[in-house]
Amino acid sequence: MDRPFAENLTSERASFVTHLECSITGERYEADRLHGLSSARRPLLVRYDLDGVKAALSRDGLAARPTDLWRWRELLPVRKAANIVSMGEIETPLVPIPVSGGPNVLVKDEGRLPTGSFKARGLVMAVAMAKELGVTRIAMPTNGNAGAALAAYASRAGIETIVLCPDDTPEINVREIAAQGARVWRVNGLIDDCGAIVGKGAAEGRWFDFSTLKEPYRIEGKKTMGLELAAQFGWRLPKAIFYPTGGGTGLIGMWKAFAELETLGWIGSERPKMFAVQASGCAPIVKAFDEGVEHAERWENAHTVAAGIRVPRAVGDFLILRAVRESGGKALAVDDIDTLRAVDDCARQDGLLLCPEGGATLAAWRNAVRDGLVDRDDEVVLFNCATGLKYPMPEAESRLDRNGPIDLAAL
Ligand SMILES: *Cc1c(COP(=O)(O)O)cnc(C)c1O
């Protein structure tokens, strides 16, 4: 077989899932059944027999496998390899940005994943589980990247998709969703307004609701960011992580990954400071953090250039806030102007084109250094969650007339 990562994809799957658990009440739910939110209307978390994993897999055994997402299969929920539709979910690189950032600032560049964003991690898992559990039609509200990843994986899996976007979602996202086989609709509202329509259809039994954290398996896919980081850092973790936070799936997933790795005895009890980065035009988690409360209120009139973090209300708010607080980190808001300057600096000075959300993490790191939350020399990881190529760039309009005189010295 010439497929890359074939070994990880075809090896007999040995999922160690024991059950699911309500993230707020701890109530137990059976594995291998279709679930949305818990009866308390909160996310469900997947639990594993970690003693079983420990007996089945060692760090050395893991190191011998190809380095894609599926090398972590014992810590993932899919039971049958045949249900996985993979497009090459690679381990993403840590790219230093010494000039626009600092000497030990690394960007985890998630833009290299299928469909150009880390939403692929969550959706490859959620779609595989939907296939495993017999789902044939899925609907989702999205600011763009999640819809694109859903469309790609679900079309490939033969699952029908309906995707609702706020009408000012980046044009390229709406088109890529359509091009990859979803029925996409622009809605005159924000992502939670789209979510309300999806929820209504789901309640009528028209489709399965794939909203962020309203199905249990996207977290498991996003968790692989934390697993990967631990392996890439030689079974320790960086001093701090700056994560652009919308629904917070990735931050919650990484926090879960670290706990599972510690239970396996693969890492110690030290944790990075988790910094949840939001835009000052949409910062519900920052407000809740500053007020010391467990749940965030809806943010009214949300606006920011970073569409991926324009999420006025997050169903997993308390999970984000708990992780940030337990880690000794903080929720930080950055202004769009600083985000755009960070994108520009990183591209010009370090040759790495960030998405606006990634730019927000660089801007937040700069503020955190200024405010003494981290040292300039600390080893930190910023998440660039999508390729910068998906977003509008400054114009470049200089032209040459090849038939006229050309001042070569002026070029
Ligand atoms: C979805 C998205 C985010 C936010 O991720 P969450 O885990 O949902 O908080 C950040 N950046 C980009 C580019 C995204 O697409």
Image (spheres, grey):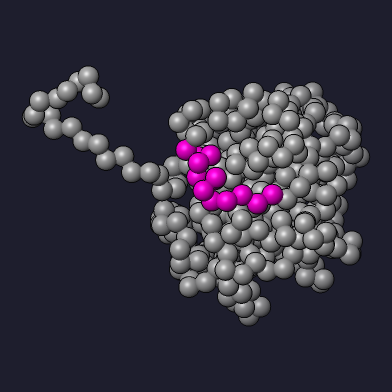
Question: Of 72 and 266, which appears nearest the observer?
Answer: 266
In the rendered image, residue 338 lying in the magenta stretch gets the answer: yes
Quadrant placement of the C terminus: top left
Residue lying at 65% horizontally and 41% vertically, measured from the top left: 367
Asked whether residue 123 appears in the rendered view, the answer is no
316 or 262, nearer to the observer: 316
**Left or right position of 181 against 258:** left
Would residue 89 be counted in the magenta stretch? no
User: Outermost residue, left direction?
Assistant: 403
Identify the residue shown where x is 57% and y is 51%: 335
Q: In which quarter of the image is residue 55?
A: top right
Q: Is residue 186 among the parts visible in the rendering? A: yes
Residue 260: x, y in percent? 84, 41
Q: What stretch is highlighted in magenta?
A: 332-344
Give the camera-side residue of 7 and 338. 338
Residue found at x 61% / y 33%: 107
> 383 or 181, which is in the foreground?
383
- Is the N terminus in the top left, top right, bottom left or bottom right quadrant? top right
Q: Which residue lies furthest to the top in this view?
A: 409
Residue 109 lies, in percent from the top left, at: 58, 36
Give the main secondary structure, helix, strand or loop, of the magenta stretch: helix
Residue 387 lies left or right of residue 19; in this view the side is left
Residue 354, given in percent of the width and then of the height, sits at 52, 39
Q: Looking at this rendering, what residue extends furthest in the bottom direction?
A: 204
